[in-house]
Image: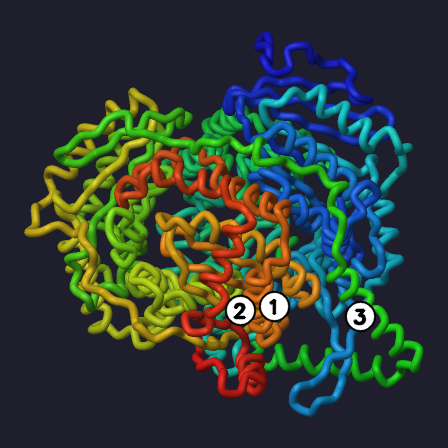
Amino acid sequence: MELTEDPRNPDLKPGDQKGGFRIEKVMELPEINGFYYELKHLPTGAAHIHISREDPENAFSVVFKTVPADSTGVAHILEHTVLCGSRNYPVRDPFFSMMKRSLSTFMNALTASDWTMYPFATQNEKDFYNLMSVYLDAAFFPRIDELSFKQEGHRLEFETDPADGRQHLVYKGVVFNEMKGAMSSPDQVMGRSLLNALYPDTTYSNNSGGDPEQIPQLTHEQLKAFHARHYHPSNAYFYTYGNLPLARHLEFIEDTVLCQFSPIDPATGVPSQPRWTDPKTAVYYYPMDPEETTEKKAQACVAWLTADIREAYEVLVLSVLEQVLLGNPGAPLRKALMDSQLGSTLSDGSGLDADNKDTLFACGLKDVNAEDAEKIEKIIFEVFSDLAENGVERRLVESAIHQIEFHRKEVTNTPFPYGLKLLLRFCGDWLHQGQPDVALQFDSLVRRFFQELETTDLLENRIRKYFINNPHRVHMTLEPDPELYEKRRAREEQRLAAIEKDLTEDDREKIQQDAQKLVQLQESLEDLSCLPMLSKTDIAPDIRVVHPSGVVENPPVELYEQPSSGILYCKSVFGIQNLEPDLIDLLPLFCHAMTQTGTADYDYVELARRIDQYTGGLGFSVSASRMFSQSSAVCLPVLHFSGKCLSRNISSMFDLIRDLVSRYAFSDTDRLRDLLLEVRAEMESSVVHNGHRLAMSLAARNFSTASALNETWHGIHQIKTIKNLTADLNPEKLKTLAANLERMAGTVFHENNMRTALIGEPADLETALPLAKDICQKMPTAAGCGFEPPDFTADPEIPREGWATATAVSFVAKVIETRPMDHPDAPVLAVISKLLKSMFLHREIREKGGAYGGFSLYQMENGQFYFGSYRDPHIVRTLEVYDAALEFITSGDYDRENIEEAVLQVCADLDRPDPPGPAAFKAFYRRLIGLSDELRRKFKQGVLEVDLEQVRNAADKYFSTSGTNAAVAVISSQDLIEEANRQLGDRALIPYRI
């Protein structure tokens, strides 16, 4: 078939040379309405892939294969350190400085097991080349000075013990503390342990992020040597995406970087793991809160090495098998494991991991007794044997393909912009010298799949090959160790004591001098004029708006015509004001149960299979938002329903929605019990990952009704609710719970309590509208309407609390009540939040304090001002930093350029693009809560007009006397909270346990 011409690059053909690159391949990508270009840089061997697509959110990345030979975290520490100044941008932190001089929609750096990536995305062409210039200089010409290595990686410092006033030696460093936090999380430990167990002879056996016990072994010279070999064009993979012309990209990269290098052999190829002839057994341990019982707190799984990542077709077959086996509650392997009642949910790491050269598949259970591991393995192999002998049900296969098709078709920007999500789809294949374009040709792979499915026992044969007859597998348990945290701390103290014992006076002086030099570097005022910067004139003055294309009054349905790639979105909200108070805490569980406990017509297995067969997902959630049409104290809590499907499945999706809201059933108490335990396990494992958000929610909860409700539903208090529910799951308790869920559904699902938005292309909207109206009109009508403020008030007490869990680091939050978005000061408060983060908190909490992150955030809706830290080695010092931040902002020690940088950051957030579906849903929800486009436009105009005087006035008004209305919440270990309270004295944190 003749190639359609790419309108964005009309003159580029295979064989052409531009900027030292030769175009090796050009291919049309009709599935995404784009074009694929594969190129090679002839002098150095650097690779480049470009995807041309009519998307203004252009993306760039340079990726290096990084293959560490140990667990010192060299690749991870290098990722941090190269962003600490370069040849053309010799400032302390050009990466974070560019965040405030740019309109980027995404900026980051990522370290995986065998690659390091430097990606960004922006909608502004000038910004694109500004950022590319900084990124290229950072990657290829970094300074990698010793002080930056000590700040980002590890260093020794003397610290005064508050208990006895004596100085003692400690380790510090951003990555050191980040990995201490990471290795406090069972799911992180499980993931690292699986790699270590399955790949003992390759780079994957090492912890690429860094093991905190090995990180201090890394030297500055080793770091520089790793850069010289790995960050060379001969080991570089460039990627660009979007609607900007490719030729200029190539010339820019050539002129900026590549023309200055000669080819080398980086020797970064990753060999396949030699395959075993016999399976193995492994036991690993994770830290656990000493106050918790270890009973049923292990994880047990079986994991296999499977196909080479370069075999795109085999990876697709394994992806289908993953979905068939584990993809929903009715999937045969998942159901068999859950029905055993040996554990609460699937083990961490379950499923297919296709990120490494040899892919892996794992499955097992969480919250088990370690001695039950053999029973779990037996269940797994019984399921495989049954499927191999009796066949995989065709319906499950088609449903699995449908899920894969749907999620490849849908354009989303979570958690990465769409252009970068495409890169991650083929990155592993590309880096291991595969055929990355094949991974983008889903339709041809699926055609081959169904051809083989018709003529062979395709999946049954693969089950035998990859699972039953595959000896390269490990039977693994991850067991809790309540003493592990203390053992690690003791070993660290012993190492430090041994080091200190051997220190000479010169050594001590050097450590102290380095600490002083680092503080001087961190506090020095820098001339950032060498960095490129946008100005206010580069900011689009208006906001993006989405209007309904049609509104139906009875029942209330809004229609939004959007280019949604053949996907229809249905969004409904239900009022909950009529719910009885004793049911409020149960709403998140109700949301889970609605799609996972079955209906009157379908048990939960059949319901799950139908949802996968006909939709891209159906789900309920709950939230509370401030009503902008009323006083700031009034909020609107609602139950959300979200559904999405391909055009061909619209009727089937609405049949399912009708069944959910009119034929709900919670009578399967065995299923309800399993669901409760699964929810509890997921919530408990999320604490360390989301500690900063949970701490902020705790602190803010009593400033408004909306904050109180959202903490009740999404915070630590919801975890406490679920833990209380699961404390004694006897049959009577489960029956009562089922009856309560039934009451909730009967209260919520009424005709006059439902508002709906349909989002999609015109023909799909025409099909969906009568179906949506029919569902609403056939629901019962109740007295009154639930779209009213609830009879619920926040506790007047301002929290000052410490919440203990198993973690080696802390999450420290402080919240101050200010004014919401419709107040004249709101734009200034938004600008202040960016000023504080970039000018003060980043330096004090991350650079000096060694935390992974420190930030301030203005919550426009409720008018709350947050301070937060992430994976923080400190509590008291960080609280002192928050106090000092208030002194800084009221001091006025900043200038007009700082204000303009903060304005850019606020506008970058405001203008971040949404894909068609989410953009329309946000518009629908804004109409519901009375947040008008006029107010949004006024707010942005206010941001653009913020000046130095306004900032200083607002700082004095809100932050000079903040002590009485400031709330504090900390999530940390019990030991660290107790130590903090000894230092805080009469300002101690009230202790709680999660």
Name the amino acid type tagged 1: Asp
Q: Quadrant of the C terminus?
A: bottom left
How far apart are labels 1 and 2 at the CA level? 8 Å
In the rendered image, the vertical position of residue 125 relative to residue 337, given as above or below: above
- The disc, 1 or 2, on the residue closer to the chain's N-terminal end is 2
Q: Which residue is mark 1?
A: 872
Q: Is residue 240 visible?
A: yes
Q: Position of residue 36 (x, y in %)?
A: 63, 22
Q: Position of residue 661 (x, y in %)?
A: 19, 46
Instruction: Give the color scheme: rainbow, by chain, secondary structure or one colour.
Output: rainbow
How far apart are labels 3 and 1 at the CA level? 19 Å
Q: Is the residue marked by circle 2 packed among few (<14), some (14-19), or many (20+) residues within 10 Å?
A: many
At mark 2, the secondary structure is strand
Q: Which mark is residue 812?
A: 2
Asked if labels 2 and 1 touch by Cβ distance under 8 angstroms, the answer is yes
Viewer-closest of 393 and 256: 256
In the rendered image, the vertical position of residue 672 relative to residue 608, given as above or below: below
Q: Position of residue 255 (x, y in %)?
A: 82, 27
Q: Which residue is mark 3?
A: 515
Name the amino acid type tagged 3: Ala
At mark 1, the secondary structure is loop
Q: Is residue 671 visible?
A: no
Viewer-closest of 721 and 672: 721
In the rendered image, the vertical position of residue 982 relative to residue 325, given as above or below: below
Name the amino acid type tagged 2: Val
- Number of dots carrying numbers: 3
- Farthest top residue in view: 2
